[in-house]
Image (spheres, rainbow, N blue to C red):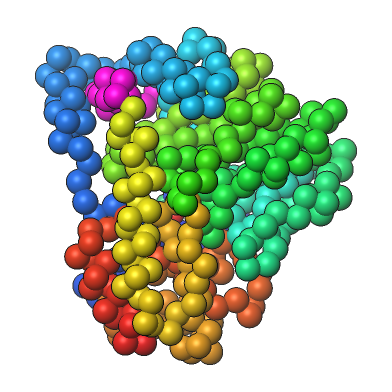
Amino acid sequence: QSSKLPENKTSIFSVMSKMANQHKAINLSQGFPNFETDKKLKKLVTRAMKEGYNQYPPALGVKELREEISKKIKNLYNHTYDPETEICVTAGATQALYSAITAFVLPGDEVIVLKPAYDSYEPTIRLNGGKPVLVQLKGENYEADWDEVRSKISDRTKMLIINTPHNPTGTVLSQEDMQKLEDILKGTNIILLSDEVYEHLIFDGLQHQSAARFPGLAERAIICASFGKTFHNTGWKTGYCVAPKPLMKEIWKVHEITVFSVNHPMQKAYAEYLKTPEPYLELSKFYQKKRDLFLNLISSSRFKCKASSGTYFQLLNYSDITDENDVEFAERLVKEKGLAAIPVSVFNINNKDHKQLRFCFAKTDETLEKAAEILCKL
Ligand code: PMP
Ligand code: GLN
């Protein structure tokens, strides 16, 4: 049979987690917490199940949840999304991204992607016959070169994808970046797909610059979010996207034919849980402590790094340790040393000389201590 995605291999996240299990290794590869989601939230799910919310919810999501999402965005980013027409609850951010790209990208359309980039964007673009136009983030800090982005815009450009805080580099876009982007997109019909799944994981006093804050971006933005990252339950696969009504109308069509609707009891639970903002407002502090612990623990190692500014990932440069490429080193690390990490080349970094692995620090302190012990001996 012919393949619609001939270049796609099994996702590195599945590959590394499987290897970690096989070798009984500490798993700092795939991004998920190894501690529990809040008991309160689990109780709310159980309660919703007992109360009988076990059949299809409305296709676009439980009404109270859409209302709470709207309130949260208004409070944080001062932009109002109409719960009836501008919000869709999805099976994780992955499905939101898939639906958003599929709803708009036609064969021959170009989509500008800043790389390194999360691994689902490009295949989804190609699956729809679109052409990813890649722009490399520059330098040690992986900064966006907006002049280069501007130079890549053509009359076929349908969409531009950003991700802040950024997986895998941990960089965040500044207010100035967003204003430059606003200026670049002004007067065009280009849709901005803004992947903000790590909006609540941002460090050192930085503020998340959601596309929703910028009128010139919000008017053309589809913003994707993930409860899994925010509430320590990636396995519940629940997220959402928001967009102005004319865009959301098209996303809904794809949503209804891919999943129709997503898990009912979880949505009821999140709707109740979101009424208290502390859990997501305190998340940055929680993860900053984990980042600092991890960095302190490995400070005597031979790894070099720039502290992550957001997400629950830390890149470490290993050029003082080995000449191996990142895939070789990651394989040896998991098989011989019992520690799994992600080789960053899978994010299409396109730089043969880069020597970095990505480590997830959404782990108990004990796990981070054990991992650091291994890293310090390399
Ligand atoms: N975008 C980015 C940048 C991610 O890191 C992830 C998940 N790790 C997703 C989207 C997908 O999120 P979800 O698990 O909610 O589908
Ligand atoms: N986004 C997570 C990561 O970057 C993994 C999600 C997945 O396994 N597809 O590790």
Q: Position of residue 103 (x, y in %)?
A: 63, 29
Residue 359 vs 353, above or below: the answer is above
Q: Position of residue 275 (x, y in %)?
A: 31, 20
- Is residue 19 in sight in this rendering? no
Q: Is 61 situated left or right of 348 in this image?
A: left
Residue 205: say if magenta: no
Residue 275: say if magenta: yes
Q: Is 46 situated left or right of 302 in this image?
A: left
Task: Report the magenta residues as a range.
Answer: 261-276
Identify the residue shown where x is 62% and y is 63%. Answer: 141
In which image quadrant can residue 195 be found? top right
Q: Position of residue 246 (x, y in %)?
A: 66, 16
Q: Which is nearer the eye, 220 or 320?
A: 320
The N terminus - image quarter: bottom right
Q: Position of residue 285 (x, y in %)?
A: 35, 47
Residue 241 vs 204, above or below: the answer is above
- Determine the residue located farthest toward the top in the rendered image: 84
Examine the residues drawn in magenta and state their main secondary structure. helix
Q: Is 47 situated left or right of 112 in this image?
A: left
Identify the residue shown where x is 12% and y is 19%. Answer: 50
- Determine the residue located farthest toward the left in the rendered image: 50
Identify the residue shown where x is 62% and y is 15%. Answer: 245
- Is residue 151 in sight in this rendering? yes
Q: Which is nearer the eye, 218 or 125?
A: 218
In which image quadrant can residue 274 be found? top left
Identify the residue shown where x is 27% and y is 66%. Answer: 368
